[in-house]
Image (cartoon, helix red, strand yellow):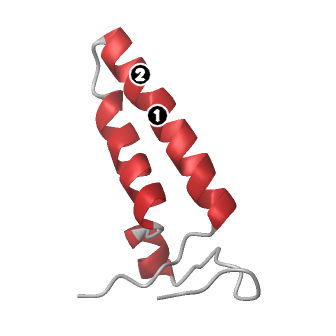
Amino acid sequence: MILKKNVGYLDSVIRTVIGAIAIVAGLYLDSYWGFLGLILVFSGALSFCPGYKIMNISTMNPDLEREN
């Protein structure tokens, strides 16, 4: 299965930063928030969000970014 990118650059950066903060908060507070952070970091790194796929949403800018 090929994952077609549906997360744009700015969205990807925001997901990665918020995910990293959630991971650190989860480790510091000894809670399960880190798992949410992992999901955000992976979706930001892969530029693919399954939720966006289900809802047929894309934040990619076709003029600036190349899709797979």
Report helix, strand or loop for mark 2: helix
Residue pushed farthest right?
63
For the residue carrying disc 2, how many other residues have a C-alpha within 10 Å: few (<14), some (14-19), or many (20+)?
A: some
Q: Amino acid at mark 2?
A: Val
For the residue carrying disc 1, how many other residues have a C-alpha within 10 Å: few (<14), some (14-19), or many (20+)?
A: some
Q: Tell me which corner region of the image, top left, top right, bottom left or bottom right, holds residue 2.
A: bottom left
**From what the image shows, is residue 66 above or below residue 30?**
below
**From what the image shows, is residue 11 above or below residue 36?**
below
Give the residue number, with chain letter if any, for mark 2. 24
Q: Tell me which corner region of the image, top left, top right, bottom left or bottom right, holds residue 42.
A: bottom left
Q: CA distance from mark 2 to mark 1?
A: 6 Å
**From what the image shows, is residue 65 above or below residue 40?**
below
Residue in view at x 43 percent, y 70 percent: 48
* Residue 51, numbered label: none
Residue in view at x 43 percent, y 49 percent: 40
Q: Amino acid at mark 1?
A: Ala
Residue 53 in picture, x, y percent from top left: 44, 79
63 sits to left or right of 33: right
Residue in view at x 42 percent, y 79 percent: 54
32 sits to left or right of 10: left
Residue pushed farthest top?
29
Q: Determine contact: label 2, label 1, CB under 8 Å.
A: yes
Q: Which residue is nearer to you in this view: 2 or 25?
A: 2
Give the residue number, with chain letter if any, for mark 1. 20
Residue 21 in picture, x, y percent from top left: 50, 28
Residue 36 in picture, x, y percent from top left: 36, 40
Residue in view at x 68 percent, y 58 percent: 10
Q: How many marks?
A: 2
Q: Quadrant of the N terminus?
A: bottom left
Residue pushed farthest left?
1
**From what the image shows, is residue 50 above or below residue 34?**
below
